[in-house]
Image: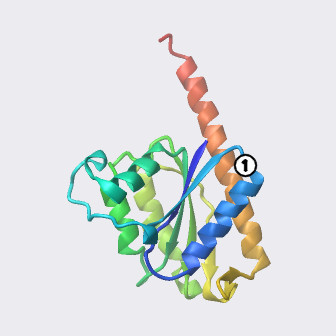
């Protein structure tokens, strides 16, 4: 199984910290799966101009093709101005409308306060649904107070990250089995 952990911002450290912890959990619990961390801060991406994702070059091509090849994606995003950052929105714009069809997508969200928890429900999940994702309904919301010196210090958050990883793998495996059963009904 190919899993992409997407850190959807080019600034700050909290989302990257959360995604590094998520990748660590994946590697520890599911070493048989291939996990790739795509930290957008490490890449120079073009703005979407309407081309197909495979027509771009360089970092933009690598990031979009890696996402498209994944079976599951965990999106890490900070909350900026009560919304997703433009860098993450640009990723969605670079991909085709059906980019997440047959893919499981889960989310980890960082924010300065609890006031922004609905951003996932009102903005991110509708985008993912529009792009045909199989969405893991629960998500991990991490506030400023849950970090200390670039470490997650809240044990409940660590437990919830473990559970999100488990749910992502379980839903991906289940969905794959359902697809295989459905495909087996055809004679070709």
Question: Where does residue 97 sit, x and y in percent of width and height?
Answer: 33, 49
Give the labeled residue for mark 1. Answer: 31
The answer to whether residue 36 is seen in the rendering is yes
Percent from the top left, x then y, of residue 63?
41, 55
- What residue is shown at x 39% (from left), y 52% (from top)? 62
Look at the image and tell me in which quarter the N terminus lies. top right
Query: Which residue appears farthest toward the top when viewing the image?
Result: 187
Query: Could you tell me residue 24's position as x and y percent?
Result: 70, 62
Q: From the viewer's perspective, tell me whether residue 162 is left or right of residue 134.
A: right
Quarter assignment of residue 40: bottom left
Looking at the image, the residue that sits furthest to the front is 58
Name the side, left or right, on which 57 lies relative to 146: left
Q: Crowding at label 1, few (<14), some or many (≥20) Cα neighbours within 10 Å? A: few
Residue at point 55%, 75% (across, down): 15
Q: Residue 45, relative to residue 85: is it above or below?
A: above
Give x and y (percent) for residue 76. Answer: 53, 67
């Amino acid at each position: 199984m190919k899993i992409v952990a997407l850190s959807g911002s080019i600034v700050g450290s909290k989302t990257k910290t959360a995604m590094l912890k998520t990748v660590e959990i994946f590697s520890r619990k599911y070493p048989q799966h291939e996990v790739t961390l795509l930290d957008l801060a490490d890449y120079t991406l073009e703005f979407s101009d309407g081309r197909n994702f495979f027509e771009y070059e360089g970092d933009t091509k690598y990031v979009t093709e890696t996402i498209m090849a994944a079976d599951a994606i965990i999106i890490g995003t900070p909350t900026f101005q009560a919304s997703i950052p433009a860098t993450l929105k640009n990723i969605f714009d670079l991909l085709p409308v059906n980019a997440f069809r047959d893919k499981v997508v889960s989310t980890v969200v960082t924010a300065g306060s609890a006031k922004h928890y609905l951003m996932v429900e009102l903005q991110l999940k509708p985008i993912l649904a529009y792009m045909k994702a199989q969405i893991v309904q629960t998500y991990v919301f991490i506030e400023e107070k849950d970090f200390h010196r670039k470490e997650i210090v809240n044990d409940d958050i660590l437990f919830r990250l473990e559970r999100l990883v488990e749910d992502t793998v379980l839903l991906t495996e289940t969905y794959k089995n359902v697809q295989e059963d459905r495909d087996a009904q055809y004679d070709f």
